[in-house]
Image: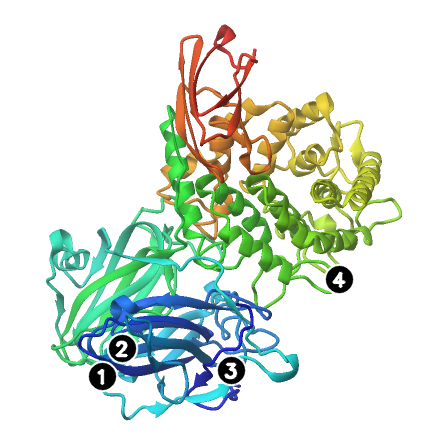
Amino acid sequence: MENRNWQAKWIWDVPQPESNVELKHQLVYFRRSFQIAKNCKPKLAMDITADSRYRLYVNGHSVTVGPCKGDRYVHYYETVDVSEYLRPGHNVLAVQVLHYPAAEPFVDGKCGPKSVWRTQSGGLLVEAKLFNEHGMELESLHSGPQWRVFRHQGYRNVPKRLIHWMGGVEDVDGTGVPKGWKESDYDDTDWEQAIPFADTRKPFGNLSPWNLTPRPIPLLYEEERNFVKVTKKEGVQIRQAEKLLRINGSTDPLVLSEDSSIMIELDAGELTTGYLTVGLRGGRGSVVRLLSSECYEAQDSSQSQRKKGNREDVSGKLIGEFDVYRVAGYGNEKEEVYEPFLFRTFRFVRLEIETKEHPLEIVYLKYRETGYPLEAKAWFESSDEELNRIWDISLRTLRRCMHETYEDCPYYEQLQYAMDSRLMMLFTYYVSADDRMARRTIADFYRSRLPSGLLQSRYPSMEAQVIPSFSLYWVDMIAEHYEFSGDKELIEMYRPAMIELMDWFQTRLTDDGIIGATSNRYWTYFDWVNVWPLGAPPESADQPMFLLSLMYVASLRKLSRLLAVTGWHDAAGEMEQRAVRIAQAVQRLAWSEERQLFRELPDTEIYTQHTQIMAVLSGVVNGEEAKSLLERALREPIHRVTLPFSYLLFQALKQTGLHDQAFQLWDRWRPFLSQGLTTLPETEMNPRSDCHAWSSVPLAEFPATILGVTPAEPGFNVINIEPRLGNLQWAKGSVATVQGIVDIDWRRDGSRLFLNVKVPGSVAACVKLPDGTEYMMQGKGRFVAILKNDRVGT
């Protein structure tokens, strides 16, 4: 299906490419009308894509949005069956297309979302044929001159510094929207004919700017929601403001008189992502302003200096930017609807309205929640109610950061970063065993490669960015995908690129045998440690960090195992030999006999948990030496890892037999429960983003540690079940695997532990109890263990 020869043509309202020196967003409407006989039972499946974004309507019904985010080498299209929306008589396909301006270098804000690829040419491509119930073709509806087109001249993007990665907000003149244009009875005879400007393929193997490929992930869901509470209001009574909540199914509009103004702040009940929609009647000339915000902040908080406490404390203020809509005022016979083209991220929304010479009715203000259709098969409960709540907000955070890609944060950037994505892939495996997003993410970063073999740190992105350490997370992605899925073919697909990536680091070795400083060319980033304003010690500007060498050693050893599994034994041996040499260099250069820790940089006394953790995970230290090192790293006053990097700390604890140390680390997540948060933030203190899925570490660690479910063999062909009790009295839940669901239920009763296990089908499980006994089982099993002195592992 890749780069096939389409019968349809790319179309637009003017010849392409057109000059766009002012970097304006272009909003263009398309329509294609057709007739269906009275007794016909039609079938209509269509392939559709656009440059840059589209929404498809059939007879006024919103059907889908797209295209799925691609890049310079892949332009995705959606295949949708719209038969259910057809009816006898007159029908219409209506498509709204927003084209973002292309500029090199990329201009923040003016060019729109950085994560959406675009060319200099706006365009719509539709391939559709109408069939009857017998499979006979009735009509070709391919995009071409039979389509009608209209450009909205009153649509404007307003760049904003706060969200410049997203571009900005909208300023829309409603008089520029053709009234009822999405409906089949709209008269479009005064619209222009669409102009075909490009075929999908060129002769002699020349590639189109849009290399068309089927969408690799499911369509996003959209579900209608209402706000749950009014938090503030001005210029209106509370009973009037609450009409917007649709309490008890009420449909009474909020009526505003002419020359009046109001302000209402509304609570969605949780941080969410959705398409805000306001329905209006009358009110010609009124101005509607919608501000989307994650939370309430202190009155002296600012966009550059955030001060966040209880996110529900309405004595504070909302920070955000306004979408603005100027009401056309159709009259009272039909609703006028305004909906920003892109979904917004919010828990709270501030509505401001100023009427002019005509009264205005607000028929509704609601939203359609949207996101990746993640099927959460896993669940978790324990005797610690706070841990249960932490699981819930972790899962909500993951959902809010999954749309067409994994996202660092839905409010500010919506960019897919390697560090974030590696973690989110793991969380997705444990929660749902769905690897479709993971596979597309691995492919995304493969296509991000530079000629040197180095990968970009975020992708897709209109502006390339490189963080060398982030490239190594790609190897983690592939290794962990194999661990959870058992898919060797995916490893084979990326073997040469992984070796090429390792070669890039190998050529950066100093005479001492470690990776040299990279800050002179790229961003040296590892973690948002409080005293590292750019994500690394300031001293690393012209010095190598041992942490990068340790990460490289860990990646070499992971790649060595992957190569051996797929039969490339000589290359596997080469990777292991490299790892041994670099590990020896780090031991020689970084170890402090006085502190009994590994330094962070040569000839400095900077020590971090990060370096000690990676010394363990890379195999530079092992056995009792590794255990003692990790105990010192937890005890000594050295730089501490943040929430996302703590995932690696948990792995190091398990590798050294310090599993029970993990339970006290969950205390770092507990304060969020008293801060009014419904999702997990980017950092622990005054974060920019209140929704950052790299903090959702419990989604991996509660199943793997407390419930104790991990793959003993790749693809869970054999399952390890070794629950860790900590100070809990009981825990239960389900864990998703590619083999099916694993159910775990354990509880203490005095000095005894009762454990119930159910594994899928004929899969074998190795059950390891705290008293040291092990059992192999299939199907269902019930086990009892004696806890000596009521302590685990003694």
Q: Quick one: SS at disc 4?
A: loop
Give the quarter of the figure containing the C terminus. top right
Q: Is 296 rendered above or below residue 321?
A: above
Dot label at residue 186: 1
What's the residue type where badge 3 is placed? Ser
Q: Pick the residue in front: 670 or 87.
A: 87
- Residue at mark 1 to residue at mark 3: CA–CA distance: 28 Å
Q: Amino acid at mark 2?
A: Lys
Reply above or below: 624 against 743.
above
- Residue at the disc numbered 2: 182
Decide if residue 529 is in sight here.
Answer: no
CA–CA distance in space, label 4 to label 2: 49 Å
**Horizontal and vertical percent position of residue 731:** 40, 24
**Residue drawn at x 38%, y 51% as measured from the top left:** 297
Pinpoint residue 581: horizontal percent, then vertical percent. Answer: 84, 39
Q: Earlier in the sequence, mark 2 or mark 3?
A: 3
Q: What residue does disc 3 label?
A: 121
User: Is disc 1 placed on a helix, strand or loop?
Assistant: loop
Residue pointed to by mark 4: 452
Crowding at dot 3, Cα within 10 Å, few <14 / some 14-19 / many 20+, comes out as many
Mark 2 and mark 3: Cα distance apart in space: 24 Å
Q: 513 and 300: which one is in front?
A: 513
**Residue 245 higher or lower than 794, as above or below:** below
> What's the CA distance linking mark 4 and mark 3?
30 Å
For residue 533, side relative to residue 194 (left or right): right
Tell me which residue sits at (12%, 77%) in the image: 332
Figure check: 318 above or below 195: above
Earlier along the polypeptide chain: callout 4 or callout 1? Answer: 1
